[in-house]
Amino acid sequence: MRLADIVGAVVGLGLFAPQAMAAASGNFSLKPREAKEIWIGATARELRICNEIASSGPIGITLDGHSPLVLRPGQCTYEMGDRILAANQGDNPAMGTWRATFAPSAALDVRR
């Protein structure tokens, strides 16, 4: 009975929760000239970040210490990081998506 109490307390405190809370994908929306920081997790990952085709303008993307990129609607890039700084560079709303990946397609890469 004592072991069950200890396991119950550990689960209740959420000590197993960090792995379950790590996100593998997401989306974001930006008002005109708005910037948002998106925290992915405690460790850097290979990420695919896209400016949605329906966006009205470019989104500036910076991951960790990497050089900033500008994604036009419909463009994607692959970068390594754990934080995304996304900034709408237009005068209309913009939308983007991100997901963790391990095998990027060079055809969609718009890096330098």
Image (cartoon, rainbow, N blue to C red):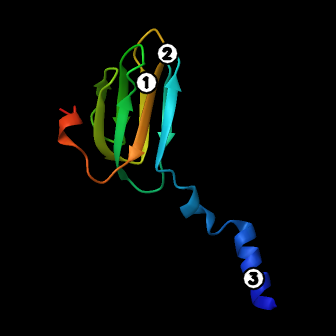
Label 3 crowd (10 A; few <14 / some 14-19 / many >=20)? few
Q: Residue at x 18, y 41 (%)?
A: 106
Percent of width and height locating residue 75: 30, 27
Question: The disc labelled 1 sits on which kind of residue?
Answer: Ala
Q: Residue at x 75, y 68 (%)?
A: 12
Whether 77 is drawn above or below 42: the answer is: above
Whether 3 is drawn above or below 21: the answer is: below
Q: Quadrant of the C terminus?
A: top left
Percent of width and height locating residue 57: 38, 14
Which residue is label 3 attached to? 6
Contact, CB < 8 Å: mark 3 with mark 1?
no
State the separation of the CA atoms marked 3 and 2: 50 Å
Percent of width and height locating residue 98: 42, 39
- Between disc 1 and disc 2, whose residue precedes? 1
Q: Nearer the viewer, mark 1 or mark 2?
A: 2
Whether 31 is drawn above or below 99: the answer is: above
Percent of width and height locating residue 97: 43, 34
Disc 3 secondary structure class: helix
Question: The disc labelled 3 sits on which kind of residue?
Answer: Ile
Disc 1 secondary structure class: strand
Label 1 crowd (10 A; few <14 / some 14-19 / many >=20)? many
State the separation of the CA atoms marked 3 and 1: 46 Å
Which residue is label 1 attached to? 87
Residue 5 position by quadrant: bottom right
